[in-house]
Image (cartoon, grey):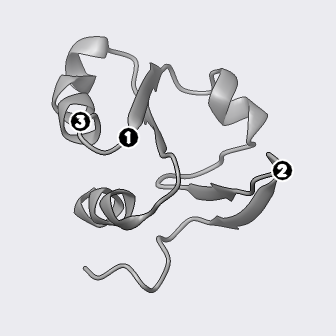
Amino acid sequence: MPRFIDHARRTPAAVLAVVVTDSDKEAVADVERLAEVARVVVEAPHAAIQSAFRVTGYPTVFEIGADGRVTDNDPVLPATVGA
């Protein structure tokens, strides 16, 4: 997660983070960390956002263009993000 947070801090784009869990209680720490750099949604496994984007593994990163279409889908953060 540190790489994602670093990337989110540096990008000029809006960032959405989806925390996948069966328990809101388990998500609290992740939500607190991510809320500093992203809009955060908590959802159960296989819920709406994951289904809409056909997510099959984690972490998954999508870039959305100005036209609202996915411009890049790579399960690893871009190489420009340091460890």
Percent from the top left, x then y, of residue 19? 40, 33
Q: How crowded is mark 3: few (under 14 residues within 10 Å), some or many (20 or more)?
A: some
Dot 2, how many residues are within 10 Å of its Cα: few (below 14), some (14-19), or many (20+)?
few
Q: What element carries label 1?
A: loop
Q: Which amino acid does label 3 sit on?
A: Asp
Q: Between disc 3 and disc 1, whose residue precedes?
A: 3
| Of the two numbered discs 1 and 2 in the rendering, the one whose residue sits closer to the viewer | 2
Disc number placed over residue 38 in the picture, else none: 1
Q: Which quadrant, please, contains the N terminus?
A: bottom left
Q: Which residue is drawn at 28% across and 64% down?
A: 6
Read off the residue under disc 2. Answer: 67
**Residue 68 appears in which quarter of the rendering?**
top right
Element type at mark 2? loop
74 on left or right of 23: right
Rendered image: mark on residue 30 = 3
Question: Image point 25% across, 79% down: which residue?
Answer: 83
Query: Amino acid type of disc 1?
Result: Ala
Kindly report the distance in space between the C-alpha atoms of the residues bearing marks 3 and 1.
11 Å
Residue at disc 3, secondary structure? helix
| Badge 2 vs badge 3, beta-carbon distance below 8 Å | no
Between the C-alphas of marks 1 and 2, the distance is 20 Å
Q: Are marks 3 and 1 in contact (CB under 8 Å)?
A: no
**7 above or below 79?**
above
